[in-house]
Amino acid sequence: MTRTLLLASNIGLRAYASTAKQQPPLLLAQRGDVEYCRQLVQRHDHDNYLVSLFSPRLAREAVWGIRALNIELVRVGESTTNTAAAQMRFAYWNESVKSLYTDHPTQTPIVRCVHDAVQRFAISKTWLRRLVSEREKMLASPTFETVADVEKYGEHAYACLIHPHLEALGVRDMHADNAARAIGVATAIVNFTRSLPLLLAQGRCDMPKDLIAKHHVDLNDLYHSPRSTPELQAAVYEFATKGYTRLCGVAEIYVPNSPRAGFPALMAAVPAKEWLERLEQADFNVFDRRLQQRTLRVLWRLWLANRRGLGWIRRTSTSRPKH
């Protein structure tokens, strides 16, 4: 049995105007700083490291710096059990982001690389400040009540990694912005679903509470014995479908109307789609070990998208989990 994925057609458009001004670059990063960021992203955000390889060199280096910053922010929440200590770390990063727009940024490899990205491409302060603030909010409120809450978080915390990539490619465009937000939502859903086995073993769950309740998922039972159940598979199916639908919107509406120069940034949709496809093949069982393995198919799909576009994302249905 299949369900049809209906694409929303009432997505509003907004006027977009760029106020960014190019400034003579004051560059501080050394090759060692760039290499540090590159290795950090390659190890901890491998899919998006592959995405970055399809961008020109300077844009690619800007992406490495910004995604390395994101990795450090994620680490604050994951490695610090003391809330006060975590808040101090976030305060440090808030000040570091402010310093990016001065001639005297905080002297760390990541900040120097992001500073150079700001100097070269006039990266908007909004995206970098939001990157810190959204990660900090997760520290205070790590659970989501509804799917809409997850979607909002994805539009902020994950899309703000794609917007600077677009700016580094010289693109400030309404349709590309809408694509970035949709990809951000899909990426949040993928990441929350992908991490379920680990989080359940830790007594946590990032899936929205409304889906958990709707499908009668017994979290207490899963915390005690993490495993796939029919109820969890049904919840995962519905959650994944939300992300898949957003990716269809990217392929069918936004990318065809976006500047071609921004396409390397929008290729962040490819790893998300590839993982959702593998999740479907695993019958929405997030504990299937194949889902935790890296696959060369991501690189192949990226190459294919670079050659042919994102049209391969278009499909009209996906299978429900078998019970």
Image: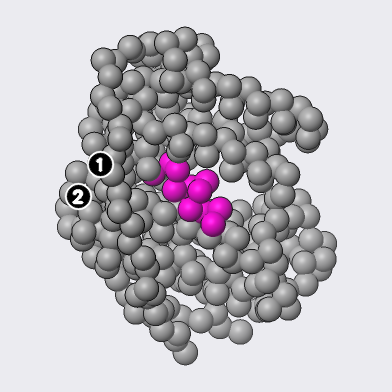
Q: Which mark is residue 292?
A: none
At x 70%, y 42%, the residue is: 139
Quarter of the view holding residue 162: top left
Extreme residue in the bottom direction:
1
Q: Check whether the beta carbons of the residues at disc 2 and disc 1 lie within 8 A of each other.
A: yes
Q: Which mark is residue 259?
A: 2
- Disc 1 residue type? Val
Question: SS at mark 2?
Answer: loop
At x 77%, y 67%, the residue is: 219
Q: Residues within 10 Å of mark 1 (few under 14, many from 20)?
A: many
**Residue 98, position in %: x, y?**
52, 23
At x 60%, y 60%, the residue is: 149
At x 36%, y 65%, the residue is: 12
**Residue 206, position in %: x, y?**
66, 57
**Residue 218, position in %: x, y?**
78, 72
Q: Is residue 9 magenta?
A: no
Q: Is residue 214 left or right of residue 120?
A: right
- Disc 2 residue type? Pro
Q: Is residue 193 left or right of residue 166?
A: right
Image vertical order of residue 192 relative to residue 109, above or below: below
Image vertical order of residue 97 relative to residue 275, above or below: above
Q: Which residues are the magenta region? A: 152-162
The earlier-in-sequence mark between 2 and 1 is 1
Q: Which mark is residue 171?
A: 1
| Closest to the observer, 133 or 292 | 133
Quarter of the view holding residue 309: bottom left
